[in-house]
Image (cartoon, helix red, strand yellow):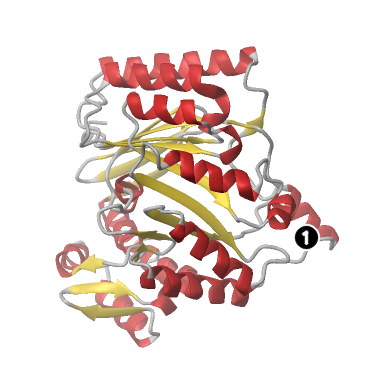
Amino acid sequence: MPHDPYRALYLHIPFCASRCGYCDFATRAVDADTVEVTEYMEGLILALRRAAKQGDLACVETVYIGGGTPTHVGAKHLTQLLYALGLSMHLTDEVECTVEANPESLDERLVRDLWALGANRLSIGVQSFDDELLGVLGRAHTAEKAREAIRMARTRFENVSCDLMCGLPGQTLEGFEADVREAAAAGVTHMSIYPLTIEEHTPFFRAVKVGSLEEPDEDAQATMMEAAARILIAAGFHRYEVANYALPGFESRHNTAYWTGKPYLGLGASAATMTQNATRRMRVQDGEVTDDLDERQMAAEDLMLAMRMARGASEEQVAAARELGLSVDEALAELEEQGAVVHRDGRYQPTERGWLCGNVLYGRLLDLAP
């Protein structure tokens, strides 16, 4: 279908040093020097060049190289990919270009090379600074390696993000608070904090099923998320999305593109692409259509996505949904009464309660156009 230009580009690298016990992403543990990795990376570069020839990259504003663990494939493959990217589009300073990294596969040479070839943001998968918890998760790095990775990243990159997890087996509130404080003190400019979720077809799911692992305590996770907000706000961060915090000016533009309904192109195994025009939105993954939304469903989804962000939905966005016949006023009134949404400064914004009960908040808005 004729569609609006893509504004974001995602490149998927599905390889890791090892599979974590909680991971259900499209990844696998493969040695970096195998033919499989070489062939995959060559194919990804060809797909990138093909997209450029078709004009699909002309309006791209953000690039995200994710996985898996992109840094696991090594400097040779990653630098070839970034070089091809620089030839395929205008990779200027204004384009946010993020590379995901894990501590065990990041070194000073790779940091220098990524920076020199146009990457301007690193996102480091730390998860915890507690070696015991890292062992429980099945992470391939130590706490000290995580500290070293942040230090190395900051020698070139001003924009460094790190991921932390909460509600882990054996994790205490005090231990989690220490992790958050340490990450903030290390000089990162962005932090993503995720509660552990047990996904089907993972070792953690099987362990819960046989009783060798307890299910995450949602109340404890909520307490930890509240503690993270308190610590990070005191450290100068602001919570701009339900799981994301940034120092002013360091919000993830790529993730924000997803939450604000901007079209994105995904290249690589299991990478999703979203195309849209004024009346239709489609998502495609591995050649299969996973979503096909009409104009009303698009409006409902946009309201739901807006509630992931602290700024929420504008009155103009609500009015547009109303004009399409959605009973948005009734839904927002219900959510306000439940304490999940507040109306202020010309916007409908999620509350802390709304975020903690996200399934209720998001589900109610999606149900406006089933």
Q: Position of residue 69 (x, y in %)?
A: 55, 35
Is 277 on the left-hand or right-hand side of 230? left
Location of residue 196 by image quarter = bottom right
Say which element carries label 1.
helix
Quadrant location of the N terminus in the rendered image: top left
Residue depicted at x 21% and y 29%: 92
Residue depicted at x 31% and y 53%: 251
Which quadrant: the C terminus? bottom left
Position of 19 with respect to 257 (left or right) is right
Question: On the image, numbered disc 1 is attached to which residue?
Answer: 208
Compared across the picture, whether 45 is left or right of 252 comes to right
Q: Nearer the viewer, residue 33 or 109?
A: 109
Amino acid type, mark 1: Val
Q: Position of residue 349 (x, y in %)?
A: 29, 73
Nearer to us in this view, 370 or 316: 316
Residue count near mark 1 (Cα–Cα under 10 Å), binned few <14, some 14–19, many ≥20: some
User: Which residue lies at the image location 22% right of the left edge and 41% below the top edge?
Assistant: 277
State the image quarter where residue 324 is shown. Answer: bottom left
Left-right relation of 278 to 330: left
Is residue 360 in view?
no
- In the displayed structure, 144 sits above or below 66; it is below
Relative to residue 233, is residue 24 depicted above or below? above
Q: x and y percent of residue 258 in the render?
A: 34, 48
